[in-house]
Amino acid sequence: MNNRLIKIQALKYDNQLHYEWDTTLLERADAHIFVLGHRGRKLKHYTKGQVFTVENWTIEFFPFDAWFTVSADIIDGKITQYYCNICQPAQLDNNIVTFLDMDIDLVYKNGSWNVVDEDEFSVNATKFSYPSDLVRRVIHEQQSLEQRIEQKRFPFDGAIDRFINVLPPGG
């Protein structure tokens, strides 16, 4: 495994830091990056003013040309949950990945996909005065991601699973 540290930073629409955590590089390509979130890592949540300990491993995907991210929770060598942010495309600068979180998320848990944080999107659309074309784009990107998942298109085509073997035994 590559030992290159990659810091992940989620920003809100006003470019304020929302939350951040450290990961390790798994793969860097022209259009995306895969990273490993280590069990026990600290997630500093600036909006809530708290630090959380993440108790599981994650394999995370950040595309530079698409409006979503993917975090796959790995427990006992299996993906148990997906958490997908709808966001503006991620950017990599040196060893820092940033993305502008657009509030709406898709979550796979207990065998089904659900849209979450639509209320947060409504509140922030008013708070930050999201332009109407941005609101339409976010809704379009949510629907596009739902289709990608349903059609098992990259990275939902097994691309994430291929990294499970980098975790230590029992990971």
Image (cartoon, grey):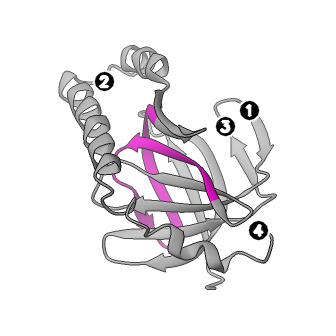
Is 124 placed left or right of 164 in the picture? Answer: left
The answer for how far apart the CA atoms under marks 3 and 1 are is 5 Å
Q: CA distance from mark 4 to mark 3?
A: 28 Å
Query: On the picture, is 39 further left or further right than 85?
Result: right
Q: Quadrant of the C terminus?
A: bottom right
Earlier residue among tags 4 and 3: 3
The rendered magenta stretch, by its main secondary structure, is classed as strand
**Tag 2–tag 4 contact (CB < 8 Å):** no
Q: Nearer the viewer, mark 1 or mark 4?
A: 4
Residue 62's quadrant in the figure? bottom left
Look at label 2 and name its amino acid. Tyr
Position of 94 with respect to 43 (left or right) is: left
Per the image, label 3 sits on a secondary structure element best described as loop
Is the Cβ of the residue at disc 3 closer than 8 Å to that at disc 1?
yes
Q: Check residue 30 for magenta coloring.
A: no
C-alpha distance separating marks 1 and 2: 24 Å
Closer to the eye: label 4 or 3: 4
- Label pair 3/2, CB-CB below 8 angstroms: no
Chain-order first, disc 1 or disc 4: 1
Q: What's the mark number on residue 130?
A: 2
- Near mark 3 (Cα within 10 A), the count class, few <14, some 14-19 or many ≥20, is some
Residue that mark 4 sits on: 171
Instruction: Name above or below for residue 70 compared with residue 170.
Output: above
Label 4 environment density (alpha carbons within 10 Å; few <14, some 14–19, many ≥20)? some
Within the magenta stretch, is there residue 103?
Answer: yes
Provide the residue designation for mark 1.
Answer: 49
Q: Where are the magenta residues, as a range?
A: 79-105
